[in-house]
Image (tube, grey):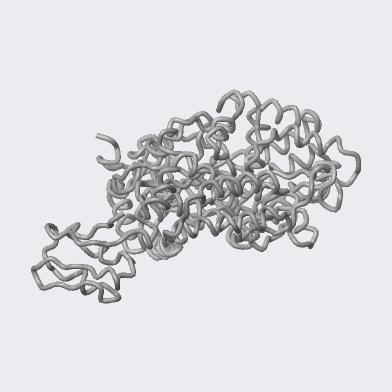
Amino acid sequence: MPEKQKGVLLRKDSVKTTKLKVGLGACGIAAGANEVYNELVRYVSTKKIPVMVEKTGCIGMCHNEPLVEIESEKEGRILLGNITQKNIDTIIDEYMEKQTVNPKYIVAGSDYITEHDGFFKKQVRIVLDNCGRINPESIDEYIEMNGYKALHHAIKNMTPDDIIDEVKKSGLRGRGGAGFHTGSKWNFTKQAPGDEKYLICNADEGDPGAFMDRSTLEGDPHAIIEGMTIAAFAVGAKLGYIYVRAEYPLAVKRLEIALDQAREHGFLGSNILKTSFSFDIRIKEGAGAFVCGEETALLASLEGRRGLPRIRPPFPATSGLWDKPTNINNVETYANIPRIILNGSEWYSSHGTEHSKGTKVFALAGKINKGGLIEVPMGITLREIVYDIGGGIKSGKRFKAVQMGGPSGGCIPESLLDTVIDYDSVTRTGAIMGSGGMVVMDEDTCMVEVARFFLDFTQQESCGKCTFCRIGTKRMLEILERITRGEGVKNDIEHLEQLALGVKSGSLCGLGQTAPNPVLTTLKYFREEYEAHINERRCPGGQCKNLISYIIIPDNCVGCGVCLKNCPVNAISGEKKEPHIINQDICTKCGICMDSCKFDAVDIKR
């Protein structure tokens, strides 16, 4: 029997060294972890229980929030899930009196080796190694986990060229989307003429369904600071900026705390570690414009101008912030740096594939049983992520597609589930790796509506500078809206393809160049759904309201009247204990009748 079924017996002498860690990332807080933490503090203090209650970041198992970890020197780490303010007292009492933990709350035990659902089994945590393990507001805990040792080694024992060579040999590619080789990018900035250089961390995470950067900033802010400081030493920068979304208040708060602590300990500011090297970091809160994730638009925003992209070259490495050489990487890229410097390039490159080294962090969301924050080695397949880590599709439904790369990405169908996760393989599908959003879709998803949703997002976020992006995406969106309303016409698919290719080739920045990807990939893999919408006035996914109708199956209906009572527009009629009917002229297709029926008597006519 797995340990989860047997429970966990704790030695009596372990109580004195026990810590109770509550996952207080934004995901945990949204699920009620703050209340759990406050109740734990109150209860432990009132009863004078000899355990420590601490905060930590996102542990990754967002589907089991709120999470509480019991950490003991004797038994290791035991993770409890779905904890509430009401049941935490009982759990602690049982733990203190019997030195046991009720197995129904255990989601991972014995340092997560015995976790029952496989969520961590195929993960390799490098960037997320500290997330969920340390208090992100404590520099001492970061230092205990070898924090700032890489910075000390880099400054004391390596030259800037040594650092850049080590990063090159590691094979690390930028984790912000394009996948450019990090070491080469640093070298361009280092070799650019000029004494004044800048370093920027792009934390402007705007993809719907993405929360990788946010969780890393909330859970391990010192790793980004250390990585940036090493990069600054390598390229010759004296000042850095973290450009983070203002919608991430917890990440901003923890960054501010970490920056102050780093300065106090001599890891930031003047004469770092008592050397001649000086470097500091400032936070710039963005206003939520998706286009500012593009590096030249980000630079414009940092300079106080409207976030508009500009023509490249010159590239930021030679002419960036205030026309000075500037290196820009994202959160995940910088978070890898301390591990590479501390453990060596050979260690890092032992993970991954020939052309895509290391690991990749993904936000696993959508119609998946076990959504959350995951980190996997490059080379793992989509199938392994969806089924082995994610636990498959909710309600036992069939997998249909996964959206990778956010609004700039594409939809990968079931026939390509064995696609290997690396930059080249994902790009060949028509999607992109992107920053790491991964939205899973099931059989009830309308792929035309998916394309419309993402194009609507990018169309609204277009800065308007390029005619093709400004007008082309608008015309594409109008066609998609017409198709989903059941008003599609014969040549709509051809027009969509022509416009998509025009927008890709005629746009200045990555937003416009990739905005058509969701449309092109759904046309490539799910063309029959477009044809059904246009030619048959039918939505196979059952989502487009104008193309579906709710019906009651007479043989299943027992005439209980629940659907009749819940219908907000009185579109249902029928006698008690007799099959009911839905008046299609009145029905608004809200779906409440289907949700309220316990006998599967309501169906969608697609």
**Residue at point 70% right, 59% down?**
464
**Image position of 408 with respect to 154: above or below:** below
Res 257 seen here: no
Question: Which is nearer the eye, 300 or 525?
Answer: 525
Res 244 seen here: yes
Question: Which is nearer the eye, 28 or 259?
Answer: 28
**Residue 168: x percent and y percent?**
71, 28
**The N terminus lies in which quarter of the figure?**
top left
Question: Which is nearer the eye, 27 or 6?
Answer: 27
Q: Is residue 191 left or right of residue 55?
A: right
**The C terminus lies in which quarter of the figure?**
bottom left
In the image as oriented, which residue stretches furthest toward the right?
194
Q: How many discs mark residues in the rendered view? A: 0
Q: Is residue 246 left or right of residue 321?
A: left
Q: Quadrant of residue 303?
A: bottom right
**Residue 12: x percent and y percent?**
34, 44
In the image as oriented, which residue stretches furthest toward the left?
577
**Residue at point 71% right, 57% down?**
283
**Residue 313: x percent and y percent?**
82, 42
Q: Quadrant of residue 574?
A: bottom left
Question: Which is nearer the eye, 14 or 29?
Answer: 29
**Residue at point 66% right, 63% down?**
287
**Residue at point 28% right, 56% down?**
605
**Residue 571: x percent and y percent?**
25, 73
**Image position of 199 with respect to 301: above or below:** above
